[in-house]
Amino acid sequence: MTPTPPPLHVGLLLCSQFPVGTDPVPAFEEQLDQVRLVRDAGFGSVFTSQHYLAHPFQYLHPLAVLARIIPELGDMRMGTAISLLALQNPVDLAEQTATLDILSDGRLTLGVGLGYRDVEFAAFGMGTEGRLRRFLDNLDLVRALWTQDRVTFEADHVRLDDVPVALRPVQQPHPPIWMAAHTDAAIRRAARRGLPWVAAAAHVEDDYLAHQVGVYRDACAEYEHPDLDLPVMQEVYVAPTEEQALEVVRRSLAVKYEAYAQWGQDQILPESQSFDKEFDQLRQGRFLIGDPAGVLARIRALQAAAQPTHLLLRMQWPGMTQSEAVSSMELFAEQVLPHLETSTGKDSS
């Protein structure tokens, strides 16, 4: 008997990435309108993502974006999907995120990832060696700074010797932490540490996503964390017909994945998952693009196959107009969202 999918927490993954030459001030104001739209439509959260030196895009810093959208959230949660943890000063990140949790009255989720772009690591004075160790050290120290009265910690890049800690997040024992991962070893690492794995479903084909979910579920059982959440990120566009949807997204989504390929995001995946494909081939088994019935069917298939608890939807890409993005969001809210059993609001981590 097929298990009943859990209620789905639906969130918006903001596209705070503007092509060079775009005026980011009005472009960000449009993003605030999107936050208000999904709030009123019944979405449960808004998330932001991170890259540094992200040419050809002006990529806004996620923590600053989260601070600004707090007054627009209503009861929605907010979070990062993801923050590049290895590149951060862990003391600074712990205090900034504790502050955001306070400002939002306990509605922050911190999604973290290792990162993969050499230019980012070089800019922060890091080579290829030691990236994972620094990522894990920073993760442990952020947790300690959130939860302990006094902290002693020593790594190559940070030292605290019985330092008293006063600043605390609202959520106890601390805000939820999610871990992004692409390789089997990294997925197992998230499960071993008892952290929900953030699956980037749009970056792999359906069959490979099923493999990754199997690795995660097996590791959760092995390490006795059977009830971990499974957040899934997806690219979504809804139009009255599939042809109209493809006409809108073909250019902007292709540009986005061309940038991903140039950055080397797919190089840690098997060759079969390469982004070096024509758009019509690339989109097959990856993106949720089509009419409302088709998108709903794809979401239900994803629910049946992966049992996700959270679905984070990126509904705009660099170069897509505000009217195009809003049209899709409204159609999704009117003709897809009401057919999903959803969980929303402050208490859905």
Image: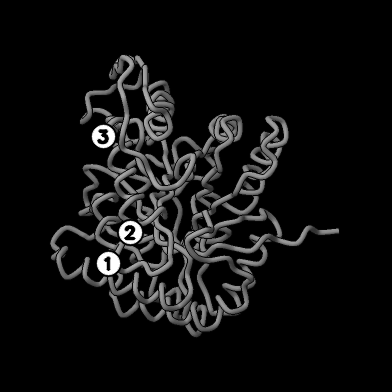
Q: Residue at x 31, y 14 (%)?
A: 161
Q: Are marks 1 and 2 in contact (CB under 8 Å)?
A: yes
Q: Which residue is mark 3?
A: 92
Between 298 and 107, the one lying in front of the other is 107
x then y, percent, for residue 256: 34, 56
Between 42 and 311, the one lying in front of the other is 42
Judge left or right: residue 272 versus residue 222: left
Q: Label 1, secondary structure: give it.
A: loop
Q: Which residue is mark 2?
A: 255
Q: Residue at x 53, y 66 (%)?
A: 344
Q: Label 2, secondary structure: give it.
A: helix
x then y, percent, for residue 221: 72, 36
Q: Residue at x 57, y 52 (%)?
A: 205
Residue type at numbered disc 3: Asp
In the rendered image of this protein, does residue 68 appear above or below residue 192?
below
Q: Residue at x 29, y 16 (%)?
A: 159
Q: Earlier in the sequence, mark 1 or mark 2?
A: 2
Instruction: Nearest to the eye among marks 3 and 2: give it.
Output: 3
Q: Residues within 10 Å of mark 3 (few under 14, many from 20)?
A: few
Between 309 and 327, the one lying in front of the other is 309
Q: Are marks 1 and 3 in contact (CB under 8 Å)?
A: no
Instruction: Nearest to the eye among marks 1 and 2: give it.
Output: 1
Q: How is the image coloured?
A: one colour
Spatial CA distance of label 1 from label 2 is: 8 Å
Q: How many marks do you count on the picture?
A: 3
Q: Which residue is mark 1?
A: 319
